[in-house]
Image (cartoon, rainbow, N blue to C red):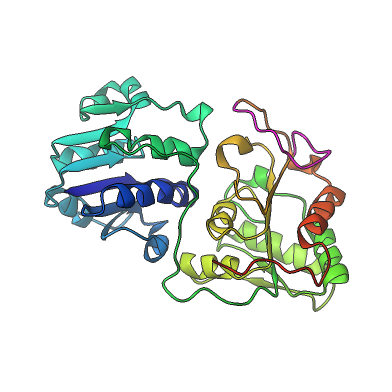
Amino acid sequence: MKILALQLKRIGDLVLTTSALAALRAGLPQAEITLAMHSSTAGLFPAIPGVDAGIVFGPKRGWGPWQQTLTGHFDVVLDFTGTDRSALATFLARSGRTITFDWVRKKKLRAWLYREFVASNVRDRHTTDHYLDLLRPLGIEQEGLPATLRLPEANPARSDYIVLHPGTARPEKFWLADRWAEVARHLAQTYGLPIVITTGPDPDERKHAEAILQGARPGSAEVALPKNLCAFASLLAGARLVVSCDTAAVHLAAAFQRPQIALFGPTNPFHWRPRHPAAIVISAAHPDEPLTRFEPRMKGAPMDRISTALVCRAIDSLLGSPSSPLPSPI
């Protein structure tokens, strides 16, 4: 059986789809699985296990990915995306079984391209479980599986540094630079571990990271721009602690079950939160203590409602003391 899995959304969506891909591989071990992804996320492909081939869509890719889809002779198409582009890819695949979510029915022009629709209310499901739901027509019923990544090179054995990832594509998710800097000073004074402030190539992200560096204790931190997604994942996999706002770093750190603190502001953590035991979620909507109860329709709030005192307490609860042992990267 040849299966085409279409996930053309952002990095976080791709990472959270790895649970469904792992379940698909376990449930249909003889299947040949091809993953179609967007060019902005394709750098992560070498770290996704259980997939036999990849197709990359995006700007300047030309006819190539469409031709791969047209000539792939796929028996099943699983469309996790539900966009015009993924619908066209589904059409070109000419598969006997085309499966997507029930909400796609609302887009009448898209809906006629599919034969099977899966009922899964994205508002009431963690995104990981929502993507797992799409496997039900194939007889695969799973829930609560963690995201799964395997770095192409051996994971780093070290965990003697801390990663702060303050950047995001959405400016309203930025936490104030002076508060990040205060957190960095607390880390340097209390734990004495090197601090790596990671950033993407976006000029606003880099400016934000440099402002944090200026406020940190001199010599305690450095700014790093990983060369690709796998390098970024590797850096997170080896960290003793990852502190980040709601962005791809949350999902990458969770895939390696690193101790982490995730800061949420305008978005609802119910759908995107890390769910492993060493993760702490802080929401601006409930700024007095870490969030332990998650509601599907919880409203967000501005990031400036999150205090440095709360973040520092969360750090101390995870690290305990400079000598407290923590799990090695998996």
In x, y percent, where is residue 236?
A: 59, 65
Q: Is residue 6 visible?
A: yes
| Left or right of residue 156: residue 33 | left
Could you tell me which residue is drawn at 53 percent across and 70 percent down?
234
Task: Please determine whether, in this image, residue 150 is positioned above or below residue 222.
Answer: above
In x, y percent, where is residue 202?
A: 57, 59
| Left or right of residue 209: residue 183 | right
| Left or right of residue 279: residue 311 | right
In x, y percent, where is residue 134?
A: 35, 36
In magenta stretch: residue 295: yes
In this view, the residue in front, 325 or 16, is 325
Q: Quadrant location of residue 300?
A: top right
In this view, the residue in front, 70 or 149, is 149
Magenta part, dominant SS: loop
In x, y percent, where is residue 65?
A: 22, 54
Find the magenta span and give its range.
284-296
